[in-house]
Amino acid sequence: MKSLYPLARGNPVSALTTLAVLGLINTSGFAADKKLVVGFSQVGAESGWRTANTDSIKSEAAKRGIDLHFSDAQQKEENQIKAIRSFIAQGVDVIAFSPVVETGFEPVLQEAKKAGIPVVLSDRAVKVSDPTLYKCFLGSDFIEEGKRAGNEALKLTDGKAGIAELVGTVGSAPAIDRAKGFREVIASHPDMKIILSQSGDFTRAKGKEVMEAFLKSPEAKQITLLFAHNDDMALGAIQAMEEAGIKPGQDIKIVSIDGVKGAFEAMKDGKLNVTVECNPLLGPQLFDIIEKVAKGETVPARVVTQEGVYEQAQAAEELPKRQY
Ligand code: GYE
């Protein structure tokens, strides 16, 4: 039979060399044309942050020639569990996901472990009793973000405020930890009182709806500060305030988290006071970790993203520089 690689015929060493020269294998022994297959289960498309996060992940996978199986859970944990099961059935090389909530993933993660498929957490954490169920959690320090928001709230109100809180998705790591960090900071200030607190599920529409209800509640007149767990809910709340004849950013001071462009625009217009940055552009770091995990290299169990805080006065200068 005629060999495709006549130079290599009958000589295994030179056969390998020839294949390497032709670019058909790489030095680590993987076939160069075998693409890395990654299953990614995303939370949904609930916010500007999430859209930027999805774009970053998809474009980085495309740039690296990774075969990305992307699945949108529409903010439902059961969809996410189904997606992970189907990634296991497909035999992907690595599974990555951004867990909608913290609890309930242990059984499916055990299944992935049994199948020998490594898992990387992106953006949000899970609570599991076995820490070997995932290789790495890449994402922000949400407690720190909550603390930063708390400190900004103190500065804006001189330590005296009736606080309304728009909570993120109930049971999600950012909602739990941002609430915790914020409370840790205001705890030593007895005149900082949380008088209303409800979930707006991280969406603009629900943020508006809940703010409308806050403004109709008996406590409405005492609200002097809004703490929104993300910018989208703050932007919805701004609309609700304006429709109720309240000046957002003045009558009610607003602190939120994410740092999306819409927040910078609102700050420029004087309607939002502070946004605490939470970086969604995780794609490059995520695939660095995934590629290492796929090669069997060890990775740190926790990688924290670097972020800042932006106040109203910086908005006009920062806005053109924002990438999301
Ligand atoms: O703050 C919010 C999004 O998990 C950090 O999810 C993320 C959060 C983000 O819906 O806008």
Image: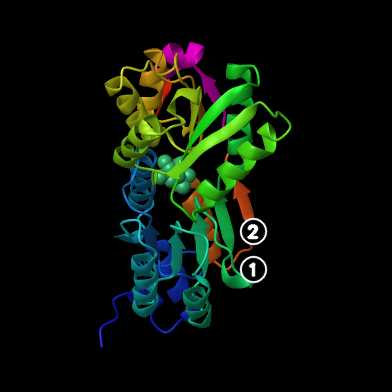
Residue at screen point 47% across, 59% down: 101
Residue that numbered label 2 is attached to = 301
**Depth check: 77 or 1 in front?**
77
CA–CA distance in space, label 2 to label 1: 9 Å
Does the rendering let one see residue 167? no
Above or below, comparing residue 204 to residue 245 in the picture:
below
Above or below, comparing residue 207 to residue 10 in the picture:
above
Looking at the rendering, the stretch of residues picked out in magenta corresponds to 306-319
Residue at screen point 44% across, 37% down: 230
Q: Residues within 10 Å of mark 2 (few under 14, many from 20)?
A: some
Does the rendering let one see residue 75? yes
Q: Which mark is residue 131?
A: 1
Instruction: Assess whether mark 1 and mark 2 are in contact (beta carbons under 8 angstroms).
Output: yes
Task: Give the SS element for disc 1.
Answer: helix
Looking at the image, is mark 2 or mark 1 earlier in the sequence?
1
Q: Residues within 10 Å of mark 1 (few under 14, many from 20)?
A: few
Task: For the C terminus, give its image quadrant.
Answer: top left
Split into quadrants, the picture shows ligand 1 in the one at top left
In the rendered image, the residue lying farthest to the bottom is 1
Q: Position of residue 318 (x, y in %)?
A: 45, 17
| Image side of residue 84 versus residue 177, left or right | left
| Residue type beneath disc 2 | Ala
